[in-house]
Image (spheres, rainbow, N blue to C red):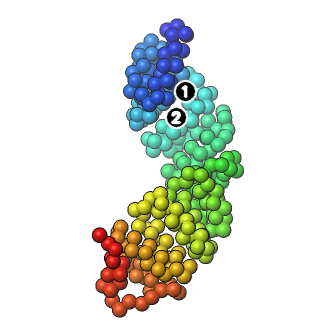
Amino acid sequence: MGVPKLQNQMRRIVADFNAGRHEQARLLCGEALREAADDPALNHLMAAVLFAKGEISEARAHIQASLAIRADNASAQLLAGRLARAARDFDQALFHLARAAELAPGAAVLIEQARTLDEAGDRAHALEVWRQLTLADPFSAEAAARLGRMLFEDGMPADAAPLLERAVKGSAPASAWFDLALVRQDLHDHVGAAAAYRKALEIRPDDAEAAVNLGVALQEAGDMDAAIEAYRTAYGQRATTFGTIAMALTSAPHGKLWIDRETLKGLLGKNKN
């Protein structure tokens, strides 16, 4: 195939792919590969298209064909790593990502390495790479959220707090707000924790756990009426939260006592449909 024709075909493939026309892009790739089966860029493109379509095994075959011809392509090594992770072939994923890091070190590779180590269950190494990523890319909300969560789990809420504050800047998922609330609660900032739980519930209104925790934070802050409303929301969403709510209401410094469980259930179910 002539170079100009191949370049035109690849431009069309990229245009279709970027426009979300993945099946059209795949068909064009297949047509081009019939004439230029050994072209590394074309095989790379086909791997990307197939990955987008969820066809992992075939995508891996094409990215390996690309790397067999041009092994020093950092973006191809990165894609090979992502594909191997999708196939849960973690050793191969880390191999390709290490090669990508040698060729083009940076945050793009670090985040894939961190995600892979997380999925592989290698927590110690994952934590270290997430830490490196927060230094390499201070604006990475994902890195800040993940490292913050891990530090909180390791009993270091004071270290986790500034990372999670960073993670919720901009458009943050409910999970980041929830984790920030947990950290604030652990640091006895109950008003701040309640504000973060409310943000989490704005994004994910059906999160019964966040509603229960909001009730606990409000109760600890001394706002019993608002705490009861939060508990009502949680109980209305998931009746199995009753035990946790009952324990919180009767054991916290600002709690109350009820004669029996049915009385408390009646209070919590007052506005329940």
Residue in the image at 40% along x and 82% along y? 246
Q: Amino acid at mark 1?
A: Leu
**Which residue is most to the right?**
135
How crowded is the residue under tag 1: few (<14 C-alpha within 10 Å), some, or many (20+)? Answer: some
Point out residue 84 in the picture as x, y percentages from the top left corner.
48, 39
* Real-space Cα separation, disc 2 to disc 1, in angstroms: 9 Å
Rendered location of residue 218, percent (x, y): 52, 76
On screen, 201 above or below 240? above
* Residue most extreme to the top: 2
The residue drawn where x is 43% and y is 24% is 25
Residue at horizontal 63 percent and vertical 60 percent from the top: 165
For the point 32% across and 72% down, the residue is 272
Q: Label 1, on which residue?
A: 67
Q: Nearer the viewer, residue 12 or 70?
A: 12
Disc 2 marks a residue whose amino acid type is Ala
Displayed quadrant of residue 31: top left
Across and down, in percent, residue 19 comes to 46, 29
The quadrant the C terminus occupies is: bottom left
Which numbered disc flags the more N-terminal residue, 2 or 1? 1
Residue reaching furthest to the bottom? 259
Q: Is residue 239 visible?
A: no
Q: Is residue 271 left or right of residue 140?
A: left
Q: Are marks 2 and 1 in contact (CB under 8 Å)?
A: yes
From what the image shows, is residue 224 above or below residue 12?
below
Q: Which residue is mark 2?
A: 80
